[in-house]
């Protein structure tokens, strides 16, 4: 029996390689069909790569396209090695710490806090452009395959704009992944006025947006791939730690607001205040590994490292494996995420 699900893919820079691993494991299960994808930032790139690959080659096409995407981002195509050798490798946490504490990284971080992307003048270029422009947009925007929704934040209003269908192009994906401290805002014409509107990263207003997946034509199950830790026990004290936690909180806030609304509607349906069928009863599931992510840093989001990317992919596959083992039977039946506990 085919189980249809929607995917909600978070952004988080190079940590989106975790989602690569999750998707790679989901593609192994031929009983699961992805019907809809909502993505922001790295989630938008993963979603576009997944759909484009699915259109031209089904499961294997999606897997190959995701591998291609992350090879462009700095991952090595094959980091397999004899099992006994892994014991001699440093942990991802040690590698992340070494990268964060490197003198050149510290100097570069200080420089970015004194300048803006507009300081480069005519020498500015968005390094993601040469990757994103290689997507086959006739496949990304195709009618078939999963419905794809990409979010970006309107700089003027702070509101989210959802791009779908033929609206998705290089600029839309670059806008969704536009961190304002690193990239100049991406200007896209307003469909009503024709005036250019600047956009920043979609994670600020929806990381990712869930509401496009409430479409009655889509299945009830929304599987959120979470790559930004919801909680940290330690108090951030260094400039990097403080900035990282600010980003985590801001990038999770929009998702938490939508989940709180979903939990409220679920309570209304369960206690009979709202009749079943009057509003969609969304079934929420979350795949993540906060313990693994807590060992990484803001720097590893911004500076892709082959070893870290490979570790993230492996962690994503493992997390998806654990989720399917524990909750595959819940898909189509009930939420596996305990929203009352989350917001209690």
Image: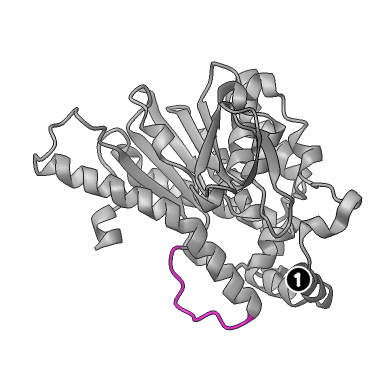
| Residue 232 highlighted magenta (yes or no) | yes
- Where residue 129 sits in the image (x, y, percent)? 78, 40
Coloration mode: one colour
Q: Is residue 103 visible?
A: yes
Give the x, y percent position of residue 296.
61, 67
Q: Residue furthest right?
A: 123
Judging depth in this view, the residue of 91 and 281 nearest the camera is 281
Residue that lies at the very extreme toward the top in this rendered image: 143
Vertical arrangement, residue 63 with respect to residue 17, above or below:
above
Q: 115 above or below 23?
A: below
- Front-most of 20 and 149? 149
The residue drawn where x is 12% and y is 32% is 275
Q: Which residue is mark 1?
A: 109
Name which residue lies at 38% across and 39% down: 222
Could you tell me which residue is drawn at 43 percent across and 33 percent down? 212
Residue 299 location, x and y as percent? Answer: 69, 66
Q: Relative to residue 291, is residue 331 depicted above or below?
A: above
Percent coordinates x, y for residue 239 in the rendering: 64, 78
Q: Nearer the viewer, residue 178 or 304?
A: 178
Dominant secondary structure of the magenta stretch? Answer: loop
Residue 109 horizontal side relative to residue 229, left or right: right
Give the SS element for disc 1: helix
What span is colored magenta in the figure? Answer: 230-238
Locate residue 76 relative to residue 94 in the image: left or right: right
Q: Is residue 45 magenta?
A: no
């Amino acid at each position: 029996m085919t189980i249809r699900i929607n995917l909600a893919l978070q952004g988080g820079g190079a940590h989106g390689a975790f989602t690569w691993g999750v998707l790679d494991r989901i593609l192994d299960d031929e009983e699961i069909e992805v019907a809809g994808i909502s993505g922001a930032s790295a989630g938008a790139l993963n979603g576009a790569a997944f759909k484009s690959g699915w259109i031209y080659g089904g499961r294997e096409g999606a897997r190959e396209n995701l591998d291609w995407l992350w090879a462009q981002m700095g991952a090595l195509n094959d980091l397999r090695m004899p099992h006994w050798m892994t014991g001699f490798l440093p942990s991802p946490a040690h590698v992340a710490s070494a990268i964060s504490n490197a003198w050149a990284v510290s100097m570069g971080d200080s420089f970015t806090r004194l300048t803006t992307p507009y300081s480069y003048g005519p020498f500015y270029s968005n390094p993601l452009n040469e990757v994103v422009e290689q997507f086959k947009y006739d496949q990304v925007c195709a009618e078939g395959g999963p419905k794809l929704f990409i979010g970006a934040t309107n700089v003027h209003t702070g509101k989210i704009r959802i791009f779908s269908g033929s609206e998705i192009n290089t600029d839309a994906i670059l806008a969704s992944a536009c961190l304002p401290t690193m990239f100049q805002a991406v200007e896209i014409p307003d469909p009503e006025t024709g005036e250019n509107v600047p956009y920043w990263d979609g994670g600020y207003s929806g990381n990712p947006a869930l509401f496009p997946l409430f479409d009655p034509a889509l299945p009830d199950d929304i599987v959120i791939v979470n790559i930004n830790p919801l909680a940290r026990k330690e108090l951030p004290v260094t400039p990097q730690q403080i900035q990282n936690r600010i980003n985590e909180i801001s990038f999770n806030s929009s998702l938490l607001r939508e989940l709180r609304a979903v939990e409220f509607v679920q309570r209304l349906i369960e206690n009979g205040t709202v009749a079943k069928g009057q509003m969609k009863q969304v079934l929420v599931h979350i795949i993540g590994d906060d313990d693994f992510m807590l060992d990484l840093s803001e720097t590893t989001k911004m500076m892709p490292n082959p070893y870290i990317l490979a570790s993230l992919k492996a962690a994503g596959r493992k997390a998806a494996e654990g989720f399917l083992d524990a909750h595959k039977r819940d898909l189509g039946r009930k939420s596996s995420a305990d929203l009352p506990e989350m917001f209690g």
